[in-house]
Image (cartoon, grey):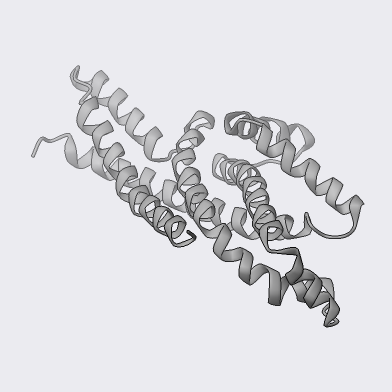
Amino acid sequence: MPAWVGPVASYMAQGLWTTLLLALLSNVISLLLGTVIGTLLVFPNRLLRGLLRIYVEVWRGLPIIIILFFVFFVLPIIHIEVDTFVAATVGLSLWGSANVAEVVRGAVQSVPQGQQEASAALGFPWHSRMRYVILPQATRRALPPLVGLVVNMIQQTSLAAIIGLLDLLEASQRSIERLTLSGGSTHAVPILGAVLLIFFVVCFPLTVLSRRLEGQRH
């Protein structure tokens, strides 16, 4: 085994841990927050729906890179100091929750109107109708696109490198630069090939799961 492999593998393992933790936190926050927002997007109160719609359209309409820069550079201006990991988590969660909310809203509204009318006729308040009647049916419709969105979020974590976060991609880039300066050879192909393989191993099973769930809907 070449001498450079051990140190590079150890350094990239740190980046991989950061990437996995970032992906886990941003996905959990996005799913929880997005589900709440998506459900409230069909709430009878028009003012609340309007405010939430603004949230969804703003964060869905911006590129993730812009959101990451906004969080990392703008928050300190208003005296909210965040490190690169927190900034990346917040930025990805804003984008992710907005997209989850739209998926959940669509799934909820796809449930036949008669289900809501029947549960309302039985005296169920709005939150009980959502909890016991609508959301259980909407969940099956929402799962395939949500799994696909989780895959997308995992892939988008690589963008956190632009604000200096030492994730898997940033660790690989720094390793290539160090090897170039120290020995004159980049070893870029095996290093980036390892990054490609890791993302494939993580994302491919989820992609297959999404396709199977989509197939079960039909």
Residue 34 appears at what percent x and percent y? Answer: 66, 54
Tell me the residue at 19%/20% (across/down). Answer: 185
Q: Is residue 172 above or below residue 116?
A: above
Tell me the residue at 64%/42% (across/down). Answer: 82
Taking depth in this image into account, of 189 and 202 the one nearest to the observer is 202
Res 31 quadrant in image? bottom right
Residue 178 appears at what percent x and percent y? Answer: 29, 25
Q: How many marks?
A: 0
Res 4 quadrant in image? top left
In the figure, is residue 168 to the left or right of 129?
left
Res 142 quadrant in image? bottom right
**Residue extending furthest left?**
1
**Residue extending furthest top?**
184
Taking depth in this image into account, of 118 and 82 the one nearest to the observer is 118
Residue 163 appears at what percent x and percent y? Answer: 54, 31
Tell me the residue at 62%/71% (across/down). Answer: 136
Taking depth in this image into account, of 130 and 198 the one nearest to the observer is 130
Tell me the residue at 62%/69% (across/down). Answer: 137
Residue 100 appears at what percent x and percent y? Answer: 62, 51
- Image quarter where the N terminus lies is top left
